[in-house]
Amino acid sequence: MPWNSRKLNDGRTIPEIAFGTWTLGNGQDPIDYVDNALDAGFSHLDTAQAYGNEKEVGIALRESGLAREDVFITTKFSGRDGLSIEQSIRNSLDNLGVKYVDLYLIHHPRLAQPDIPSAWAVMEKIQAEGLAKSIGVSNFEISDLTTLLASAKVKPAANQILLHPYVNVRQAPLVAFCKANDIVVEAYSALTPLTRQRGGPVDKPVNAIAARLDASPDQVLLAWARAKGAVLVTMSSKKERVEGYLKAGDIELTSDDVRDIDVAGALGVRLSARTVLRRVAGLTVLTTAAFGVCTYLGVEIF
Ligand SMILES: NC(=O)c1ccc[n+]([C@@H]2O[C@H](COP(=O)([O-])OP(=O)(O)OC[C@H]3O[C@@H](n4cnc5c(N)ncnc54)[C@H](O)[C@@H]3O)[C@@H](O)[C@H]2O)c1
Ligand SMILES: OCCc1c[nH]c2ccccc12
């Protein structure tokens, strides 16, 4: 089963795998790696106002010789340079050298100013004007989506979120909420067990599945995120890896494979210092309250 397209709630389609362009300035020319990706067969590019590379993405697109309608382009409003959402999309279109983008996202809920309903109304106007064929959000939690949906005329077509085995437990309710509301989940950083969180419990099942399927660990992790119902946003500046990502569309995991990765992911959950502090503080408040109630009722604890 190769990578296909998924239906969006506005009737359009989105290719199931995107080539992302956020590189934290690793010194390589974005034109080169976007060229590589298009050459290898990617038909979906993901950029953002904040990535500062929309011009290069536009150049690579023109260099590829592909027709505009054959490449799905996503960019995002990242609240840069004091520009409004409307000014930002026009600026992004200029940078990219295109008349429309296929998907325009609000990069983060805190960028939805002055509030989510007002920012979303501007997104709806942008879609009505044809500047973006589809509109969506990124990094929105259930509470943000609930606020948005309460006044939206148009539902977000997609929510681009962090999704990998170590955040699966935390993100599962959000993924289920998106599914129930017909919002496509786009997963970014699905390869985290191979990059920022190497050497964790997920390695064991991923390596075993990779060996059994004659695949690479990155391909298994992409297949895992796909099994969760997500469209993938990944990247590499290495041509062989880019080609491997595209071949990962043929990998089919069994439900046992997915479960083994889920279980290992749950074991490797990392709690941030803030979460640990919050939990300790919560426990302290609870214990103090329990002691208070017992003292008030005259119940002896010890
Ligand atoms: N909306 C957002 O807030 C947001 C946040 C992060 C990323 N993104 C998007 O998602 C894209 C991809 O993000 P990412 O880079 O975190 O994704 P990713 O998890 O897919 O990681 C890609 C990296 O993994 C490396 N890799 C692949 N296979 C490997 C292997 N076998 N061993 C070691 N390393 C390997 C690649 O070289 C590449 O650098 C970004 O470019 C951007 O477009 C969006
Ligand atoms: O998308 C990658 C992460 C990122 C880079 N710049 C941003 C601005 C807002 C939200 C997320 C990001």
Image (cartoon, rainbow, N blue to C red):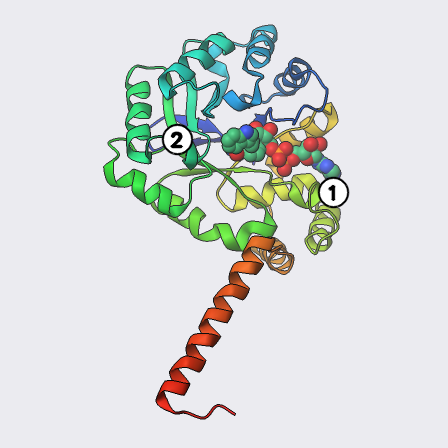
Residue 73 in view (yes/no): yes
Residues 63 and 214: in front is: 63
Marks 2 and 1 sit apart, C-alpha to C-alpha, by 36 Å
Q: Position of residue 211 (x, y in %)?
A: 75, 47
Can you tell which quarter of the image residue 141 is in?
Answer: top left
Viewer-proximal residue among 152 and 4: 152
Residue 236 at x, y percent in the picture: 68, 28
Q: Residue at x 61, y 17 (%)?
A: 38
Q: Give the number of the disc on residue 136.
A: 2
Residue 1, picture quadrant: top right
Q: Are marks 2 and 1 in contact (CB under 8 Å)?
A: no
Residue depicted at x 32% and y 19%: 126
Residue type indicated by callout 1: Asp
Which label was assigned to residue 52?
A: none
Name the front one of labels 2 and 1: 2
Q: Percent x, y for residue 297?
A: 35, 89
Q: Position of residue 261 (x, y in %)?
A: 62, 54
Q: Which mark is residue 214?
A: 1
Determine whether the residue tagged by mark 1 lies in a helix, strand or loop: loop
Q: Quadrant of ligand 1?
A: top right
Residue 254 in view here: no
Q: Residues within 10 Å of mark 1 (few under 14, many from 20)?
A: few
The residue tagged with tag 2: helix, strand or loop? strand
With 72 as the anchor, is 147 left or right in this view?
A: left
Query: Residue at 61% of width from left, 6% of height from top?
Result: 63
Residue beneath the point at 32% across and 44% down: 146
- Horizontal arrangement in the rendering, residue 76 relative to residue 247 (left or right): left
Q: Earlier in the sequence, mark 2 or mark 1?
A: 2
54 sits left or right of 120 in the view: right
Q: Amino acid at mark 2?
A: Gly
